Image (cartoon, rainbow, N blue to C red):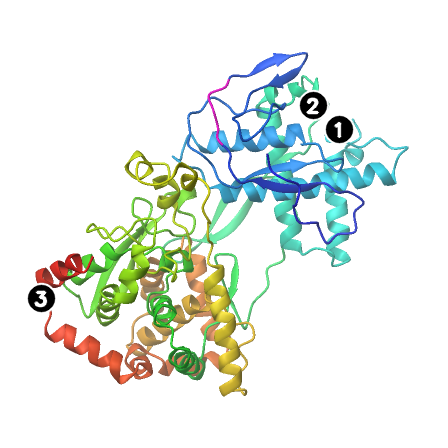
């Protein structure tokens, strides 16, 4: 069972409720068994008998499954039962549901529980608990929580976006209770006294694939907290993050710092992000076989394309939620450099220390740390660790007890990169620069390049949406809006691909030139296999 070492909230609430994670959690085949209005179930040897359960499933081991603890140190049965129910429902759509979604729900429900426990201490004469839903709507626990969140926004204790997500998690929790009475029967309750919220339909504006303004009707509730839209003149909102495109001078400063720091692997990772617009998890989960595949492809106008996301071994954001899959555009000269690195002794040595090893199939990651560990553990590896194909050659404990990485080493490197830039070019302010800003820089460079070639804005947006894998065209239009609104960015118009090539050292240019001139697809592929 998970130890209680979760992070405490910064809010001033008198509650020790917290969320923590099971290092090893193994669902088993169970059925609901109600005894004295309590749902009982048996967990595996890593846990203990408790009063929450998993719907019938046969699954592998799950890492970092969340558990919510009350302030008195006991597990919150109903909250944990809901999390397992949520996971089970997701498992009907995905082989391995995204655990991050469950963790997020757990964190927001923990915040709700903390507020309830705090309110119980502060208002001992007034009843308040999860099921406090009296006839007077104003007094219901859910509406009181919304008022607390609105006050917290006003006092700047939490941001509007955080409050909005929290209340949405609470709505999802109660919606599950309404739709699945068996969830609340464990508390001796057959049904909720009154509705925790009122449903309503609203019309919202959006842009369709052609960029035309449209209206659509969506279901919402009267608990919804609206997040004010703001124009980010110095940033582009993409994937929920504020991204800051780099000017040409800033891009050159980054390039020079990368050469000074003499880390070939991070240098190449940064180039992939800058010249393809790929997110960190996509860059870090590229595999050797993908580079071989692209080497054997015929470039079109100097570019080759790789499918990433659902159905591939390369991770992208939202792939589990929406079966996301799209093509990433690679400059062919960059593939030549990546292929050269894959053949290097350094890369071979790192693969030899890793989980996948140095096999001839090229299944291993292209980028690994010096100990053979990942920079961003792929979804495929989480499954492969439990596969018969691999379990026969690795120790049983290593199937489940291994580090899951989420790019922290990359972020640490970017911090050192910024320090190096400040030391050599103190006039540049890159304090907010992050790895994800390479993505925004790619988008702005692409837009400027196409505009300079006379391409119409609507066509640019259509192409950029495809290249960056945006779910909504509205996100892509932010790149045009940013360009129009930010005077500073107009200087980036010079930073088209041809000028960016000036950043590279003569050595890199020579490597790419020699490999391009002497390219022999079959020979290169055989050479790669021999070196493994």
Q: Position of residue 356 (x, y in %)?
A: 30, 49
Q: Position of residue 387 (x, y in %)?
A: 33, 36
Label 3 to label 2: alpha-carbon separation: 70 Å
In the picture, measured across the screen, residue 262 lies left or right of residue 300, that is right
* Residue sitting nearer the eye, 111 or 36: 36
In the picture, measured across the screen, residue 356 lies left or right of residue 432, that is left
Number of numbered discs present?
A: 3
Q: Which mark is residue 133?
A: 1
Label 1 to label 3: alpha-carbon separation: 72 Å
**In what element is the residue under mark 1?**
loop
Residue at 30%, 34% (x, y): give it.
Answer: 388
**In what element is the residue under mark 2?**
loop
Magenta-colored span: 26-30
Other residues around mark 2 within 10 Å, as few (<14) / some (14–19) / many (≥20): some
Label 2 to label 1: alpha-carbon separation: 7 Å
Identify the main secondary structure in magenta.
loop
**In what element is the residue under mark 3?**
loop
231 drawn magenta: no
Other residues around mark 3 within 10 Å, as few (<14) / some (14–19) / many (≥20): few
Q: Earlier in the sequence, mark 3 or mark 2?
A: 2
Q: Is residue 222 above or below residue 317?
A: above
Q: Which residue is mark 2?
A: 192
Q: In this orientation, does residue 221 appear?
A: no
In the picture, measured across the screen, residue 359 lies left or right of residue 112, that is left
- Circles 2 and 1, Cβ within 8 Å, touching? The answer is yes
Q: Which mark is residue 520?
A: 3
27 drawn magenta: yes
């Amino acid at each position: 069972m998970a130890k209680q070492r979760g992070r405490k909230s910064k809010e001033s609430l008198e509650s020790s409720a917290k969320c923590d994670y099971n290092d090893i959690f193994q669902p088993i085949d169970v059925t609901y068994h109600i005894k004295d209005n309590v749902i009982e179930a048996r967990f595996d040897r890593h846990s203990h008998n408790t009063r929450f359960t998993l719907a019938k499933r046969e699954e592998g081991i799950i890492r970092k499954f969340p558990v919510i603890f009350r302030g008195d140190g006991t597990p919150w049965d109903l909250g944990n039962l809901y999390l397992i129910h949520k996971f089970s429902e997701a498992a009907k759509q995905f082989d391995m549901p995204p655990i991050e979604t469950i963790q997020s729900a757990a964190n927001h429900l923990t915040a709700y529980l903390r507020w309830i426990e705090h309110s119980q201490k502060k208002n001992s004469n007034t009843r308040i608990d999860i099921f406090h839903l009296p006839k007077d709507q104003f007094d219901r626990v859910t509406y009181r929580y919304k008022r607390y969140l609105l006050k917290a926004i006003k006092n700047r204790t939490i941001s509007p976006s955080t409050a909005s997500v929290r209340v949405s998690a609470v709505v999802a929790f109660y919606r599950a209770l309404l739709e699945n009475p068996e969830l609340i029967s464990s508390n001796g309750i057959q049904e909720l006294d009154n509705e925790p919220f009122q449903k309503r339909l609203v019309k919202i504006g959006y842009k369709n694939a052609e960029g035309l303004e449209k209206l659509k009707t969506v279901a919402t509730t009267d608990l919804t907290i609206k997040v004010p839209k703001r124009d980010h003149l110095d940033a582009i909102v993409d994937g929920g993050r504020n991204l800051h495109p780099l000017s040409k001078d800033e891009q050159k400063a980054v390039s020079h710092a990368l050469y000074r720091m003499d880390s070939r692997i991070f240098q190449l990772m940064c180039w992939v992000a800058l010249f393809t617009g790929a997110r960190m998890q996509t860059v870090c989960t590229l595999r050797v076989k993908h580079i071989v595949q692209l080497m054997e492809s015929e470039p079109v106008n100097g570019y080759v394309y790789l499918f990433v996301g659902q159905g591939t071994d390369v991770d992208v954001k939202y792939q589990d939620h929406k079966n996301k899959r799209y093509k990433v555009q690679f400059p062919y000269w960059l593939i030549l450099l990546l292929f050269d690195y894959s053949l290097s002794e350094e890369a071979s040595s790192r693969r030899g220390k890793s989980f996948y090893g140095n096999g001839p199939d090229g299944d291993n990651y292209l980028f690994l740390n010096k100990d053979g560990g990942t920079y961003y553990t792929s979804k495929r590896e989480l499954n492969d660790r439990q596969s018969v194909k691999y379990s026969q050659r690795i120790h049983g404990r290593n199937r489940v007890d291994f580090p899951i990485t989420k790019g922290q080493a990359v972020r640490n490197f970017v911090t050192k990169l910024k320090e190096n830039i400040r030391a050599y070019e103190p006039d540049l302010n890159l304090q907010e620069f992050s790895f994800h800003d390479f993505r925004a820089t790619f988008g702005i460079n692409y837009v400027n390049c196409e505009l300079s070639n006379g391409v119409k804005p609507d066509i640019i947006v259509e192409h950029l949406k495809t290249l960056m894998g945006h779910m909504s065209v509205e996100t892509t239009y932010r790149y045009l809006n940013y360009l129009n609104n930010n005077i500073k960015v107009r200087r980036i118009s010079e930073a088209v691909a041809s000028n960016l090539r000036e950043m590279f050292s003569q050595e890199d240019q020579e490597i790419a030139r020699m490999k391009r001139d002497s390219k022999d697809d079959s020979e290169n592929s055989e050479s790669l296999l021999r070196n493994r």
